[in-house]
Image (cartoon, rainbow, N blue to C red):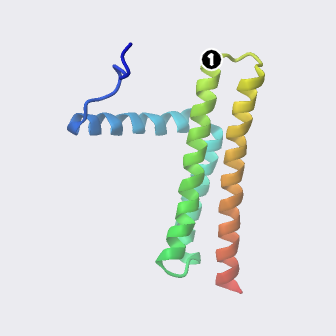
Amino acid sequence: MSTTSPYKSQGGLGRLRNALKFSLQGFKAAFQHEAAFRQELLLAVVLTPAAFWVGRGAMQILLLISTIVFVLIVEILNSALEALADSITIEHHALVGRAKDLGSAAVMLSLLLGGAIWATVLYLRFH
């Protein structure tokens, strides 16, 4: 039995081109199929420019924008987990349900962390 996947790329510029293509397909799928991703993306469109007004200095601006990107990353990972789980079964299964709940909890924690960081920077900016 081979320990290498026949689907793994060999490297080089072709690998980079394919990685970009697959990443763009992932963004497209998230946008087309995931309402939560679209909502968080809309929030990102609003909050990213706001970060430049709220943040005092490059580090605070970067921190604020990083929280936005972090939420999008966790949402994409959660959506990937849900798609994989649904490809296994769409019927109720305790472990599939647990996996989906854990992904949802990760999204919630990323949102709470982002909210806490934004609230702290806003407090420091206006207090």
Q: Position of residue 85 (x, y in %)?
A: 64, 24
Secondary structure state at the residue bearing disc 1: helix
Q: How many marks?
A: 1
The outermost residue toward the top is 1
Mark 1 belongs to which amino acid?
Answer: Ile
Q: Mark 1: few, some, or many residues within 10 Å (few <14, many ≥20)?
A: few
Residue drawn 58% across the image and 25% down it: 84
Q: Nearer the viewer, residue 98 or 21?
A: 98
The residue under the point 72% across, 44% down is 105
Q: Locate residue 87: give its quadrant.
A: top right
Q: Position of residue 77 (x, y in %)?
A: 57, 40
Q: Quadrant of the N terminus?
A: top left
Where, by quadrant of the figure, is residue 17 drawn?
top left
Image location of residue 32, percent across then percent down? 55, 34
Q: Is residue 10 above or below residue 111?
A: above
101 to the left or right of 13: right
Tell me the quarter of the image containing the C terminus.
bottom right
Which of the 4 quarters of the picture holds residue 18? top left
Residue with the most extreme bottom position:
127
- Tell whether 113 sits left or right of 51: right
- Pick the residue in front: 38 or 117: 117
Residue occupying the point 54% across, 37% down: 30
The single residue placed furthest to the front in the displayed view is 1
Q: Which residue is mark 1?
A: 88
